[in-house]
Amino acid sequence: HAKQNGGNSQMCFSPAMTEQIQQRYALESALANAVAAAQLQLHYQPQLADSGQVIGVEALLRWQHPELGAVSPAQFIPLAEANGQIEAIGQWVLQNACSQLQQWQNDPQLAGLTMSVNISARQFYLPDFVGTVQQCLQQYQLIPELLILELTEGLVLANLDDAVARMQQIKQLGVRFSMDDFGTGYSSLSYLSRLPFDEVKIDQYFVRSGSSANPRDWVIVDAIIGIANTYGMKLVAEGVETEAQRQLLQKSGCRCYQGYLFARPAPVAETEEWIKQQYR
Ligand code: C2E
Ligand code: MG
Ligand code: MG
Ligand code: MG
């Protein structure tokens, strides 16, 4: 802070910082136009059961800018979350994912697949988010149980009572909730028992620990799987890249996997073709 630098209110940025700020600004103004310019696209990554059966997909947002190229969601989602653009983007994602789910519901080869959608904090806490979800269910005539909303633990714990109340309202519609990136935040494992999640996703950091130089982290994976199984929550391991990791997860009691070992996130046509080739 400028104050701490001798009370001078003038800000002083290094050239590197200036460039960072300019990049951020350029990205923000480009992103403001992304929905209208049809630069956003959803990719889908399959989730598989032990049997090899595909049970669902996660929708992952992609932004292709004519000059900037492909921008990673890890880069632009936090920006959009900070400046409020996520409200429009998140709405676009939910609508498109629901529309896709409707098409799959009506396709005999794809019916029954679940659709997981990442929901950001700002989107979740919008005054009418419950109404938005309800509206989507009606508009696309969805089987509510096939729609899964992914929330992070940080989002929930930031506003525990409000979050749980909102989740309960949405669960009454039949929609399900998944806790994304579990284990990476600061919540204690005991929180899981108090939160109405139907599913827990083990973060890829922990999945990787199974085959890394840090086997001590595997104790945490075991604990997460044990607790989730005890509470009757479905478990999905994300970022599964090797058969060795899959086997370790299976041995610890995990029954559902998502990762490059099976398929990378891909555009809808590619995903549909891939799923139809799998045993279902
Ligand atoms: P996430 O929800 O935890 O999604 C999983 C991320 O792991 C995705 O990155 C996916 O491409 C990647 N991944 C999947 N399998 C593997 C693997 O085997 N190895 C490795 N190394 N990575 C794997 P992606 O698509 O870049 O998305 C990053 C994050 O951006 C997401 O993390 C999510 O937090 C956020 N995000 C993406 N789409 C949306 C969206 O529509 N709305 C919101 N609010 N956030 C989104
Ligand atoms: Mg996710
Ligand atoms: Mg995740
Ligand atoms: Mg993640």
Image (tube, grey):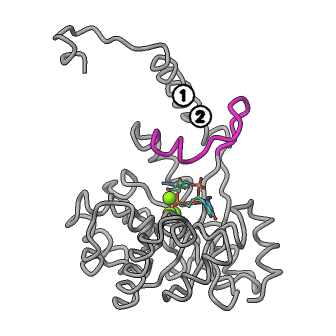
Q: In the image, is 10 to the left or to the right of 176? A: left
Q: Is residue 77 magenta?
A: yes
Q: Please, what secondary structure does the residue beneath circle 2 have?
A: loop
Q: CA distance from mark 2 to mark 1?
A: 7 Å
Work out whether residue 35 or residue 224 is closer to the camera in this orientation and state it.
Answer: 224
Q: Nearer the viewer, mark 2 or mark 1?
A: 1
- Which residue is located at x 62 percent, y 86 percent? 49
At mark 1, the secondary structure is helix
Quadrant assignment for the C terminus: bottom right
Q: Quadrant of residue 232?
A: bottom left
In magenta segment, residue 183:
no
Residue 8 lies, with reference to residue 119, above or below; the image says above
Which of the two residues, 108 or 233, is positioned nearer the viewer here? 233
Where residue 60 appears, as percent x and y from the top left, is 60, 58
Residue marked by disc 2: 33
The N terminus - image quarter: top left
What residue did someone put label 1 on?
29
Q: Which residues are magenta?
A: 63-80
Q: Are marks 2 and 1 in contact (CB under 8 Å)?
A: yes
Q: Position of residue 53 (x, y in %)?
A: 69, 87
Q: Amino acid at mark 2?
A: Asn
